[in-house]
Image (spheres, grey):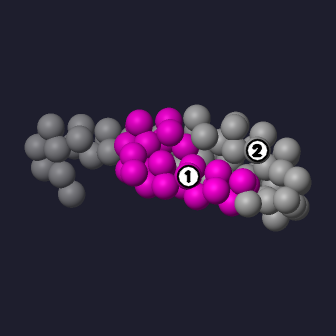
Amino acid sequence: MANTTSAKKAARKIVRRTEVNKARRSRMRTFLRKVEEAIASGNKAVAAEALKAAQPEIMRAAQKGVVHKNTASRKVSRLAHRIGALAS
C-alpha cells in the first residue's frame, strides 16, 4: 500500500489509466475480430472495407502506447496480405 501522498496519487492515476487502456485494447481487438470474420467469410470487398476501418484504430492504439508501433504495423501488414490472397 502506498504511504506518501504522491504515491497514493500515482496509484489512483494508474487505476484510471488502466481502465482507459483496457477500453482501447478491447476496441482494437473488436475491429481485428471483424476483419478476421470478413476474411473467414471469403468476401474480399467486405474484408478490405473492414481492414480500412480497423487500420486507424490499430495505429491509434500504437500511438497511445497500448501496443508497440511495430506490433501494430505487423498486424496491419499480415491482414492486408491475407486479404490480398483472397480470391475475389
In the image, 8 versus 88, the foreground residue is: 88
User: Which is more N-terminal, label 1 or label 2?
Assistant: 2
- Viewer can see residue 45: yes
Q: Is residue 33 above or below residue 63?
A: below
The stretch drawn in magenta includes residue 24? no
**Residue bounds of the magenta highlight:** 58-84
From the viewer's perspective, is 20 left or right of 6? right
Residue 80: x, y in percent? 64, 51
Residue 65: x, y in percent? 38, 43
* Residue designated by label 1: 77
Residue at (78, 40) in percent of width and height: 49
Residue at (32, 45) in percent of width and height: 14
* Residue designated by label 2: 48
From the viewer's perspective, is 53 left or right of 39? left
Residue 87: x, y in percent? 85, 59
The amino acid marked with disc number 2 is Ala
Circles 2 and 1: CB atoms closer than 8 Å: no
